[in-house]
Amino acid sequence: MNNSDQDLWNRVRERLKSNVGDDIFNSWFARMELEAAEGDTVRLSVPTRFLKSWVQSHYAERLLACWQEELSTITRIELTVRSAVLKPLPPKAKAPEAVAPASDKREIKAGIELPRAAAPISAVHDALGGSPLDPRLTFESFVVGRSNTLAHAAAKQVAQGRRGDAVMFNPLYIHAGVGLGKTHLLQSIAWAGNATAERKVLYLTAEKFMYGFVAALRAQNALAFKEALRAIDVLVIDDLQFLQGKATQGEFCHTLNALIDSGRQVVIAADRPPSELETLDERVRSRLAGGLVVEMGSLGEELRCEILKARVTAAKLHHPGFDVPASVLIYIAKTVTHNGRDLEGALNRLLAHSKLTGQPVTLEMAEREIRDLIRPQEPKRIKIEEIQRIVARQYNVSRADLLSSRRTANVVRPRQVAMYLAKQLTLRSLPEIGRRFGGRDHTTVLHAVRKIENLVNTDTSLAEEIEILKRQLQD
Ligand code: ADP
Ligand code: MG
């Protein structure tokens, strides 16, 4: 293969990257290599069979299209698996990434430096190379407020642990809606751990865990993968709600048990509490619920304002001319209530606008620029337990009555109302609602929902009762 082929391949890679986005590119194409380009055929290789089959089934057409845009004579892509024989790396062949100088932080992966004893196997190393860390997401830049005090304190505690310390709560499970700082806290833990090199902290998204595991399995290194995973001190898994698949779950369960039982710390974040991770089986859920479960609430106005201030201070370091008057900060904090991401987005707009126009930031400009970020309050996340509690109180029955199999009229109606509200006000599925109402079948739930739907059309006092219940739940 000559240089011009390699140049060509580089251009194709760029096309691919802008076509599928950085995340997807890094997950599936980063390790793809050009073997040969001959006539109408391009031969590419990937390190595992899993990657090959994934790319073939999901990206074959786009890959070909990107090639054709560079070289129209290409009509065929052949994908092969590189070096079926995995060679152990010579010990110390790779400098551990974690000791890169601090100025290079951007490049540091949360990845572990593999055990000195066992010779690392490249596929395993790759599989375990953690998800990338964002250098901005550290404890220093995390603003503590009422809604996240506990989560922050727990995360700090975990981050300060030393190898061999007794683990206080395991796993630490943090849940919150989108943009409320879960990833920020988790990555702070990973940065803190890596900074001291005292313990090995591995930060993985659930997707990366799945992908790493499956890839290692396909490469028939499941054993080595497990051992490497077990050689870490702190495992941090983000967005657990995305963990899917029976095999992965089984493996996740084993890993969790192995780590916890051997006194290693596990930290998990998800968008919902363990009990609501519907795709996970009961054993995993109860193990997850067995540690410390902390919820982070929505960002209060004061906290939003503090976050904005911190952001402006950080931005000024790189853009000395940039400033945002207090009135504008307050305006944003009051109106952009959605989540931390939109706060960041709002400031970025102001920054871009003032840079491009050379104008200082004013309230008028802010009002114009961020209009579309102002959304109506996101509906509160309502929990099924909360619905049961409020309905039980309203009808003067106990929550246990609602969950029981009693069929007397004074219990049946409230139970139906509660199921109806659960369907209307939460995103839970019918089977899930059934499960949460004392293990009822989904058809029972459906029946209750239909029944109440019909009744509210004719029975105005019931309709009113339901309105009142809804209002209580939504405040
Ligand atoms: P999640 O993972 O919960 O969806 P992120 O951690 O990605 O949310 O947070 C979204 C954005 O809001 C990030 O830019 C993050 O830095 C910022 N953010 C959220 N909470 C805080 C906080 N308490 N202090 C500083 N920044 C925060
Ligand atoms: Mg996140």
Image: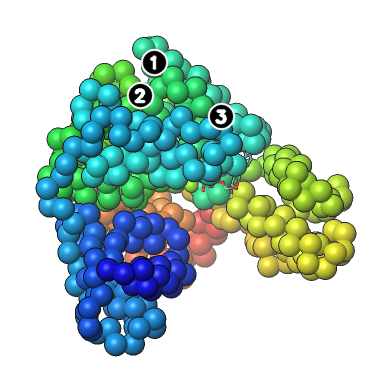
Q: Which residue is mark 3?
A: 152
Label 2 or label 3, whichever lies nearer to me, is 2
Q: Looking at the image, which is closer to me, 393 or 181?
A: 181
Quadrant in the picture for residue 197: top left
The residue sitting at 21% across, 50% down in the picture is 215
The residue sitting at 16% across, 41% down in the picture is 87
Q: Is mark 3 within 8 Å of ligand 1?
A: yes
- Closer to the chain start, of discs 2 and 3, is 3
Q: Residue furthest bottom?
A: 73
Q: Residues within 10 Å of mark 3 (few under 14, many from 20)?
A: many
Residue 454: image location, x then y, percent: 39, 69
Which label sits on residue 163? 1
Q: Residues within 10 Å of mark 2 (few under 14, many from 20)?
A: many
The residue sitting at 44% across, 32% down in the picture is 98
The amino acid type, in three-letter code, at marker 2 is Asp
Residue 191: image location, x then y, percent: 51, 32
- Closer to the chain start, of discs 1 and 2, is 1
Q: Residues within 10 Å of mark 1 (few under 14, many from 20)?
A: some
Residues under numbered marks 1 and 2 in contact, where contact means CB atoms less than 8 Å apart: yes
Q: Is mark 2 within 8 Å of ligand 2?
A: no
The amino acid type, in three-letter code, at marker 3 is His
320 displayed left or right of 5: right
288 displayed left or right of 118: right
Q: Which residue is mark 2?
A: 233
